[in-house]
Image (cartoon, grey):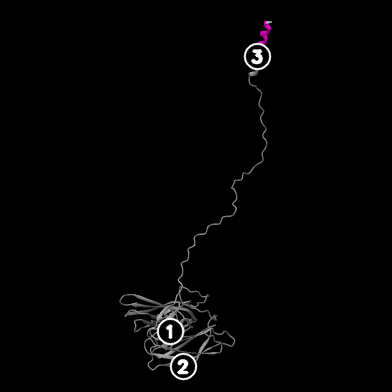
Amino acid sequence: MACMKKLFLSVLAVWLLTACQPSASVIPTPTLRPVSAVTLTPYAGPLPAATPSLTPADTPTPLPTVTPTPRLHTIRRGEDLFGIALFYGIALQDLLTANPTVNPYALRIGDQLIVPAAQSTPTLDPRNPPSPTPVGLSLPRPDCYPTRDGGVWCFAMLDNPQPFDVEGISVVFRLYDRITGEILSQTAFPPLNRLPAGGQIPVAVFFPPPTALQFDAGLELLTALPIPPESRRYLNTEIIQEEIRISADGLSAGVSGLVRLGGEEGEASAAGVIVVAVALDDQERVVGVRRWESGQPLATGQNLPFEMQVYTAADPIARVVLLTEAVP
């Protein structure tokens, strides 16, 4: 009995030791499933609700412009309305409109004129814009005459040697002080817009006092543009029945006549007519210029009377040349 008990305990101990040993079974290898190729897309984040616009660069604020205001001019001895208009660079008609009570033939020294601001410059042909080099014109040395109040009148007659008409002319007069070296400059425009081929046109300017007692005068051409042959911006005019009455002392001349618009009946009428009287001394120097302008239209074949007085700024008047112009 004792032996069987010992045998049972031995068998039980062996069984217990065997149960505590780790299993020696092989772990099965997992089978890999094929996976389809996948393309990865970077994440850009949520789309904006609206496309942002670029902020424009700062635009400079334009500087304020000064509103032109009328000026006052005190009439001095030897002045006339045309010379005053030339000095301020305005049309004679604008000066007359601003002073409706002034008699242009009876100006009084010391009276004041309202001078409106210049509103325009000479009309240029858009097909011929201004260029750095103007059309060549013959420029004489200007003739300048001091006035009693210390001012200086300067005149010059421009010649057009070109085979075509010219417009948009502007020049600058300069006075060189021989003592101080100071230079005075004044820009001037002719009293007419067009200078015909082979023709002449005067320019004049007034230097107000004080001016140099000893000076040299110079003239420079600023602009001059050719007029195309096919241009019809100017009409043919002629002066008939002209009458020129030079005073006994040669200080003034009365001018009158009729302006006739040429062309065939039914062609364009003139919106306005300009007549210019150029006073010359016995040496053919310009000593005075006067411009007459009509604001009323003129039809083809009709006559328009004109009358004006021209004065000399220097030597007595020997003869007077009349020029005219009309635009459709």
Quadrant of the snapshot with the C terminus = bottom right
Find disc 2 in the rendering and name its residue.
243
In depth, the one of 313 and 48 nearer the eye is 48
In depth, the one of 138 and 8 nearer the eye is 8
Magenta span of residues: 2-16
Q: Residues within 10 Å of mark 1 (few under 14, many from 20)?
A: many
How far is the residue under mark 1 from the one under mark 2? 22 Å
Q: Secondary structure at mark 2?
A: strand
Q: Residue 150: x and y, percent?
A: 34, 81
The overriding secondary structure of the stretch rendered in magenta is helix
Q: Residues within 10 Å of mark 3 (few under 14, many from 20)?
A: few
Residue type at numbered disc 2:
Glu
Cβ atoms at labels 3 and 2 below 8 Å apart: no
Q: In this rendering, would 237 be left or right of 106?
A: right
N-terminal of the pair, mark 3 or mark 2, is: 3
How far is the residue under mark 1 from the one under mark 3? 147 Å
N-terminal of the pair, mark 1 or mark 3, is: 3
Check the image and report above or below for 239 versus 230. Answer: below
Residue type at numbered disc 3:
Val
Q: Is residue 138 visible?
A: no
Find disc 3 in the rendering and name its residue.
14
